[in-house]
Amino acid sequence: MGHNPAAVPVAEAIDRIARQDGGRLLSHLVGSLRDFQLAEDSLQDALESALVHWNRNGLPAAPNAWLMQVARRKAIDRLRRSANLHAKSAEIAHLIELENGSAMADEPDPIGDERLKLIFACCHPALDRKTCVALTLRSVCGLKTEEIANAFLDAHEAMAQRLVRARQKIVRAGIAYEVPGREGWAARLESVLAVVYLIFNEGYASGSGRHLRSDLCEEAIRLGRLLMTLCPEEPEIEGLLALMLLHYARRAARIGASGEILTLEAQDRRLWDRAQISEGVALIEQALYRGRPGPYQIQAAIIAVHAEAPSFPETDWQQIAWLYAELARTADNPVYELNRIVAVSYVEGPAAALACLKPIAMALVEYQPFYAVQADLLARDGQIDQARLAYRRAIELSHSGAEKLFLSERLEALVRGVLTGPG
Amino acid sequence: MKYMALIYMDPNTRTPPDSPEFGKMMSGYQAANEVYKKDGVWVAGDALQPITTATTVRVRNGRTETMDGPFAETKEQLGGYYIFDCANLDEAIRYASLIPHAAMGCVEVRPVMVFDR
């Protein structure tokens, strides 16, 4: 080995390992230590130790195996130093046995992959959703705590506390470190998918400005790909990945010149990422072919129809209306019906759509998009005064600056349209 | 692992004992108890007398002070409990969701603390 290795490349190599293999290493450690916090701390110890040793001697032949062995020793050390040494003696014995069984292997990467267990633990429905998101980003994706804190505009200390509490709950509440069996599968998978989609939306909904946010989208897509590798032939996983890819393909067209969010109608479709769209479309077709549709697949199919339309007016609205009707059957959510009505308006006209709006008005009385849709339909139907009222109500109910701006511009355009209109 | 399931209910929506719903609720408890016993997870379980029978006890400066009623007015009140012995939280949640009051009030599931010897 070179006797004067530069410090920077070693630190970089360690960062890269932590990002690329951190989840796999941690999943393996949690498996043998049976203690989430101890595994996390020991891996951190091992990475710090690597910085010292690798700077001195260069990278070992099998860095991951090196890290695992050191992490196990650090764990033994931590257990020995703990206040209740007596109670921990059985665990220490178990670890020493493991340690003796694993001669410093020459095989490059003897570490098993238990990331699926790790993902199911991190996304357990008994943890609150924000905690699941943070824990998944930290433990599975290997993001640093301060990166996660930044992404959520949280103080570093508060985020670190949240992660510690979550790991303690996993151990103390007896959240199993295993892939759920058939009985719990559907509900637990639903929770995992919801967390991944939440990570994606956290990045996507926030708009352009902040660099880290688009990282969150890419992290979510990476998680989707990982899940697909770990449990192949699960159509809802394919559906979710397709959905994220198809949304993300439009990112460059989504934000206007002054930072405003552009609707599908206003987007320049030449800016859409065609390669990503093809991948998403192929995935959703593969998923639907399995004949077990679910909400993520249907949402992806809707976006796929949009993605393949050459222009807004040329969209297959009939197909979209039908897909929203299917989606509404998976969950009692009037928002799906609202979207179906929008599609209907492009097939049967605004008057027919307005008639469909009445039955869901009660359920959506405080819902901003309801009034935005109603305003748009009224304007297209020539009921300008009514449309203005609806826009004003929508602006009142909106909490986002970008959204208020968008709605105000619509309202203004309506007023201008009336002033310069015929007659 | 042992888990305690604390059953909370709104006393204003209590099922009156002379209603047909009451019989249905009681047979729900009976069915749940049978499952717990059959699966070997039952450790303990009781219903509590209403909160109007409660006495709050505090010891201050070595003196025992008592007070009529609950510590604080809350909408949902503790009405009973179970202790289950289960392999993990998922199992505990599954058994807790068989408790009829999970469908009316709510059930809080907490692991019982084990002190290191």
Image (spheres, coloured by chain):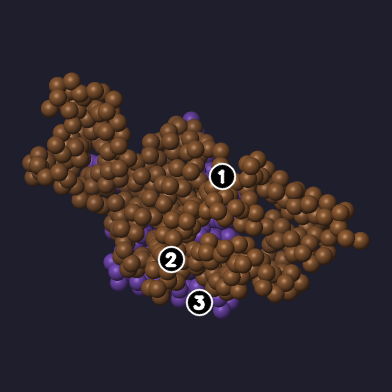
Chain colours: A brown, B purple
| Residue neighbourhood size for the residue with mark 1, other residues' Cα within 10 Å, grouped as few (<14), some (14–19), many (≥20) | few
Which quadrant of the figure has residue A342?
A: bottom right
Looking at the image, is mark 1 or mark 3 nearer the viewer? 1
As drawn, the label of residue A206 is: 1
The quadrant of the picture occupied by the N terminus of chain B is bottom left
Residue A406 pos. (x, y %): 70, 48
Name the residue: 18% across, 43% down.
Answer: A91
Chain of the residue where label 1 is placed in the rendered structure:
A
- Which residue type carries mark 1? Ser
Which callout, 1 or 2, points at the residue further toward the start of the chain?
1
For the residues labelled 2 and 3, say whether their Cβ atoms are less than 8 Å apart.
no
User: Do dots 1 and 2 share one subunit?
Assistant: yes
- Which residue type carries mark 3? Lys
Looking at the image, is mark 1 or mark 2 nearer the viewer? 2
Which quadrant of the figure has residue B14?
A: bottom right
The answer for how far apart the CA atoms under marks 2 and 3 are is: 46 Å
The kind of secondary structure element at disc 3 is: helix
Name the residue: 61% across, 53% down.
Answer: A267
Residue B18 shown left or right of residue A368 in the figure? left
Looking at the image, is mark 2 or mark 3 nearer the viewer? 2
For the residues labelled 1 and 2, say whether their Cβ atoms are less than 8 Å apart.
no
Q: Looking at the image, which is closer to me, B26 or B93?
A: B93
Work out whether residue A405 can be spotted: yes
The answer for how far apart the CA atoms under marks 1 and 2 are is: 26 Å
As drawn, the label of residue B66 is: none
Q: Which residue is mark 3?
A: B24
Residue A313 pos. (x, y %): 65, 65
Work out whether residue B111 can be spotted: no
